[in-house]
C-alpha cells in the first residue's frame, strides 16, 4: 500500500456510468490505501460533494447528470 508520509487516507469518489470501470478503479484504489467509492451518475455525485467528504473526484465527462460539467462547477464552488 502507498501512503503519503504524515497524510490521512484520501477519500476518492469515482463518478462514472460504466460499472466495470468504476468497480475496478475503486478496487485498485482501495488496495493502495485509499478510501474509494463510486456512483453511477452526476446527481448522486453532487449529493456526496455537497457533504464535503471527498478529497479527490474522478468523473466521467459524458454521463447522466454531468453533460454540462455540473460536477466541475459544483467542485469549484
Image (cartoon, grey):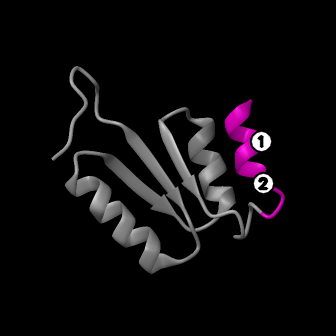
Location of residue 53 in the rendering, given as x and y in whole percent from the top left corner: 48, 35
On screen, residue 59 above or below 21: above
What secondary structure is the stretch in magenta mostly built from?
helix
Local packing at callout 1 (Cα closer than 10 Å; few below 14, some 14-19, many 20+) is few
In the rendered structure, which segment of residues is drawn in magenta? 67-77
Answer with left or right where residue 45 lies relative to residue 34: right
Q: Which residue is at a point 62% across and 47% down the rendered structure image?
A: 47
Q: Which mark is residue 73?
A: 1
Residue 68, percent across and down? 84, 58
Residue 9 against residue 20 in the figure, above or below: above
- SS assignment at label 2: loop
Residue 3 in sight from this viewpoint = yes
Mark number displayed over residue 60: none
The tag on residue 69 is 2
Whether the residues at callouts 1 and 2 have beta carbons within 8 Å, the answer is yes
Q: CA distance from mark 1 to mark 2?
A: 7 Å
Kindly state the secondary structure of the residue where label 1 is placed. helix
Could you tell me which residue is drawn at 70 percent across and 49 percent down? 71
Please indicate whether residue 1 sits to the left or right of residue 60 in the image: left
Amino acid at each position: 500500500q502507498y501512503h503519503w508520509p504524515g497524510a490521512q487516507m484520501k477519500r476518492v469518489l469515482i463518478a462514472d456510468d460504466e460499472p466495470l470501470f468504476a468497480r475496478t478503479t475503486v478496487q485498485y484504489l482501495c488496495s493502495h490505501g485509499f478510501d474509494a467509492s463510486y456512483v453511477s451518475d452526476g446527481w448522486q455525485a453532487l449529493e456526496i460533494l455537497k457533504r464535503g467528504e471527498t478529497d479527490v473526484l474522478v468523473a466521467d465527462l459524458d454521463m447522466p447528470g454531468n453533460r454540462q460539467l455540473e460536477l466541475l462547477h459544483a467542485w469549484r464552488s
